[in-house]
Every structure is written in C-alpha cells, then in structure tokens.
Image (cartoon, grey):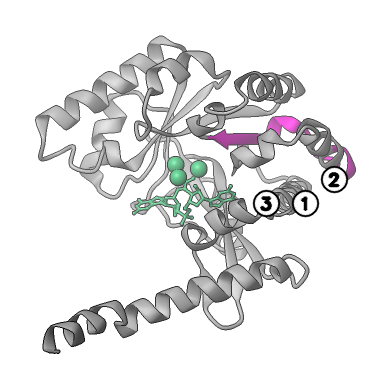
Amino acid sequence: SKIEGKNQFQIYSPDMNLNSFKMFTLKNDLKKALVKEEFLIYFQPRINPLTFELTGAEALMRWNHRKWGIVSPIDFISLAEESGLIVKMGEWLLREVCRQIKGWLEQSINFEKISINISSLQLFQSDFVQTVSTILNEEGVDSSYLEFEITESVIIDREEHVLKTLKELKSMGIALALDDFGTGYSSLNYLRKLPCDTIKIDKSLINDILSNNETYDIFEATIRLCHKLNKSVVVEGIETYEQLSIIQKLDCKEFQGYLCSKPLKQEKFLEFLHLGKWT
Ligand code: C2E
Ligand code: CA
Ligand code: CA
Ligand code: CA
C-alpha cells in the first residue's frame, strides 16, 4: 500500500544509508588504522583571556580515512572504546604528543602544557600508570608539560582503582583536568572527590549566556565555586567577543574556542607557537 511505501522510504532514505554504511566501514577499518598510520593529531590553542598569550593546547585526534577523508572523533572514539582499541590509540597519541613537545622544546619554544583526553577504559587498565611512565621515559619528556583530561564518567565504575590511578599520575607530576564540567549528573560531588587542579567548563554552559539571565547566573556561580575550591578554570567553546568579555570579568585563567582558533594541523599550530600569542 501507499502507506507502507512511504514508511519504507523513510527507513531507507539515502542519507541514512550513507551514514550507517559509513559507520559500518569505519568500525571495520579502525583495526587497521593504527598500523596504517592514519591517525593525526590536531592542536587547539589554549589562551589567557587577559593577555591573549598562548598557554598551550589540547591535542585532539583525527582519522585520515582513505575513503571518507578526515573523520571526526565524534564518529570513531566511541567505536574505539567499544572495541577496546582506544587503549592502543591512546598510547600512540601520548607518544606522538611527547615527540612533538620534545621537538618544540628543542626549538626553544615557550608554552606551559599540552593536554590530552584520556578515556575511562585507559584508566581502568591495571598497568596504565606504568605505561605512561615508560613512554615519558623513552621519549625523554618531563611530566610537567602534560595534562590529562578526564570526564566524571571515569569514576562511575571501579572508583577506588580510578582514584588511586589518578593520584599516582598526579604524584608523577602530570596535571589533571576535569573535562566537560556542567554536562553530567552529580558534578558537584566529583568536583570534591577527583584530584583535579583544573576544571574545563563545557561549551553548553556558555551557549546562550547572553540571551538568558538564568544561564548567566549558573555560569557565574559555577566559576565562583571552582575558584573557591582552588581550581583553575578553562572555558571551552568561546565563539564571540561578548562571551570573551564575560570570562575576562570572571577571572578565568584560560579559554579555547573558534573565536581564537579551531583545532589546527601541526604546521599551523607551530606558527601559533612561534607567535606565542593570539593576535
Ligand atoms: P572535548 O574533549 O570536549 O573537545 C572539545 C571539542 O570541542 C573539540 O571537538 C573541539 O574542536 C570543539 N570545539 C572547540 N572550540 C569550539 C567552539 O568554539 N565551538 C564549537 N562548536 N566547538 C568547539 P573534536 O576535536 O571534534 O573532539 C570531540 C570529542 O572527541 C572531544 O571532546 C573528546 O571527548 C573526544 N576526543 C578527541 N580526541 C580524543 C582522544 O585523543 N582521545 C579520547 N579519548 N577522546 C578524544
Ligand atoms: Ca577535552
Ligand atoms: Ca570538553
Ligand atoms: Ca567531550
């Protein structure tokens, strides 16, 4: 009948076919991507909102797929977590970031830290701290140049093991940041529990800050709370000068956002590093 025909059309829309076909092939190709060296690292500058100086960057993974081109981590990180491949990918990322850091330091370039995202599956590995320590030693990079970004979801399972691991990383000299703050369930409890020095405020908290008074009040109170707990605040997703002027008043230490820069390829980021400043 006509009605069935219409439903079928909705289910098999060309758009959905392409997307599910893409996810299907990505899942299959992910296993080979590491060996084929198809992963890339982009760097998004972290900027001091008052001086516009570059403090460092967040390393973000990209996949240069031979058929689909540059694939976003939104499309492959969860696949990598489901299959467990994220553990090896994370090791590769850490080693590559260490090599970059070493190269920049050899050129006498000045920066504070490079942060990398750590998946909960990595923290669940019993040898994670040992692996990190081995990579840092082999690459000859000082732990003080690194920050690990974690989300509060890490603590939902195996709380004791995760807290122990985080404390060990911290005592090794690696800075810890709580990522995506303001998006989870019981954030206030984790703010106290997790041994993080830095809180990264999620983009969703500043999205409609200029058009909505309540949103502004929540944002301001969140930042005050972080400061009261002696946490340094990074605001993510700054896209306008109006948003920038708000965080300048609220004494945030750093921001990231398209207003200043999208995540950049290594060569482009190197130019930024040489300038040392957002101009
Ligand atoms: P995230 O850690 O919250 O990273 C920030 C994301 O926000 C990045 O997307 C960045 O490009 C985007 N962003 C930054 N500024 C703006 C802005 O002003 N406006 C908008 N609309 N977006 C902005 P990206 O690179 O696509 O990464 C997405 C997520 O993928 C990351 O979110 C992180 O959860 C995950 N991810 C990326 N690389 C890795 C990795 O190496 N390991 C793990 N475990 N996860 C990763
Ligand atoms: Ca992050
Ligand atoms: Ca984030
Ligand atoms: Ca995220």
Stretch in magenta:
137-150
Q: Are marks 2 and 3 in contact (CB under 8 Å)?
A: no
Amino acid type at mark 1: Arg
Q: Are marks 1 and 2 in contact (CB under 8 Å)?
A: yes
- Left or right of 195? Residue 9 is left
Residue at the spot x=67%, y=51% of the render? Answer: 84
First in sequence, mark 1 or 3: give its number: 3
SS under mark 3: loop
SS under mark 2: helix
> Nearest the camera: 177 or 36?
36
Q: Is mark 1 within 8 Å of ligand 1?
A: no
Rendered location of residue 71, percent (x, y) = 52, 69
Residue 211 placement: quadrant:
top left
Density class for disc 3 (Cα within 10 Å; few <14, some 14-19, many ≥20) is: few
> Nearest the camera: 237 or 274?
237
Residue 14 placement: quadrant:
bottom left
Rendered location of residue 184, percent (x, y) = 38, 32
SS under mark 1: helix
Q: Is residue 215 magenta?
A: no
Amino acid type at mark 3: Gly
Residue at the spot x=78%, y=33% of the render? Answer: 142
Amino acid type at mark 2: Glu
Q: Which residue is mark 1?
A: 99
Residue at the spot x=72%, y=47% of the render? Answer: 94
Q: Which residue is mark 3?
A: 84
